[in-house]
Image (cartoon, rainbow, N blue to C red):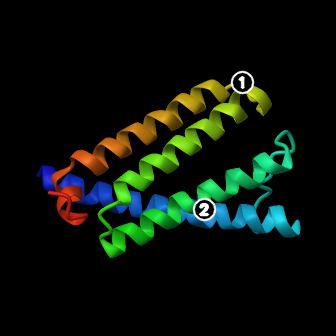
């Protein structure tokens, strides 16, 4: 039963990585060319350099997980933790320096909690240890 839940969670991570990659690429298209792919993604409160790093990290987060998952790259969990640390740092700066939404602090806590949960899963799940040949 646990293995089945773990398998479904890994599929959810794949879907999330596809979403992150698509979101990051759409953000880059809008950032570089001014063309809105689906909905406006740029935050006018973010400086251009911050926006660039934002889209770079989001794109890398999704693309590296997809590459690592399908190639069974054993360093995928390690690289994801590094990217999560970069994303958490970037989001901290955005949350405390630029964002104006009332729920920004709650959103930040939820985001960082997600990074921690996924990281623990990638390192501790037997399924992921087997998948990435880390056992």
In the image, taking residue 130 as reference, residue 113 lies left or right, namely: right
| Residue 82 visible in this rendered orientation of the protein | yes
Residue position marked by numbered label 2 in the rendering: 59
Q: Is residue 50 above or below residue 99?
A: below
Q: Quadrant of residue 91?
A: top right
On the image, the x and y values in percent for residue 43 come to: 81, 46
Q: For the residue carrying disc 2, how many other residues have a C-alpha within 10 Å: few (<14), some (14-19), or many (20+)? A: many
Q: How many marks?
A: 2
Q: Quadrant of the C terminus?
A: bottom left
Nearest the viewer among 92 and 7 is 92
| Residue 100 visible in this rendered orientation of the protein | no
Q: For the residue carrying disc 1, how many other residues have a C-alpha within 10 Å: few (<14), some (14-19), or many (20+)? A: few
On the image, the x and y values in percent for residue 18 come to: 51, 66
Residue at 71%, 26% (x, y): give it. Answer: 96
The circle drawn on residue 102 is 1
Give the CA separation, mark 2 to mark 1.
26 Å
Q: Is residue 7 above or below residue 46?
A: below
Residue at 24%, 57% (x, y): give it. Answer: 128
Please tell me which of labels 2 and 1 falls first in the chain: 2
Element under disc 1: loop
Q: Nearer the viewer, mark 2 or mark 1?
A: 2
On the image, the x and y values in percent for residue 113 come to: 44, 33
In the image, taking residue 116 as reference, residue 60 lies left or right, namely: right
Residue at 76%, 32% (x, y): give it. Answer: 99
């Amino acid at each position: 039963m646990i293995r089945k839940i773990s398998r479904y969670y890994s599929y959810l991570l794949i879907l999330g990585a596809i979403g992150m990659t698509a979101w990051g690429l759409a953000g880059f298209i809008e950032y570089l060319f001014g063309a809105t792919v689906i909905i406006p993604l740029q935050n006018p409160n973010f400086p251009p350099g911050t926006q660039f790093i934002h889209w770079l990290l989001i794109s890398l987060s999704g693309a590296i997980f997809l590459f690592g998952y399908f190639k069974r790259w054993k360093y995928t969990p390690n690289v994801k933790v590094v990217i999560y640390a970069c994303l958490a740092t970037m989001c901290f700066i955005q949350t405390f320096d630029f964002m104006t939404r009332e729920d920004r602090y709650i959103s930040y806590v939820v985001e960082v909690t997600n990074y921690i949960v996924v990281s623990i899963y990638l390192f501790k799940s037997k399924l992921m240890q087997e998948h990435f040949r880390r056992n």
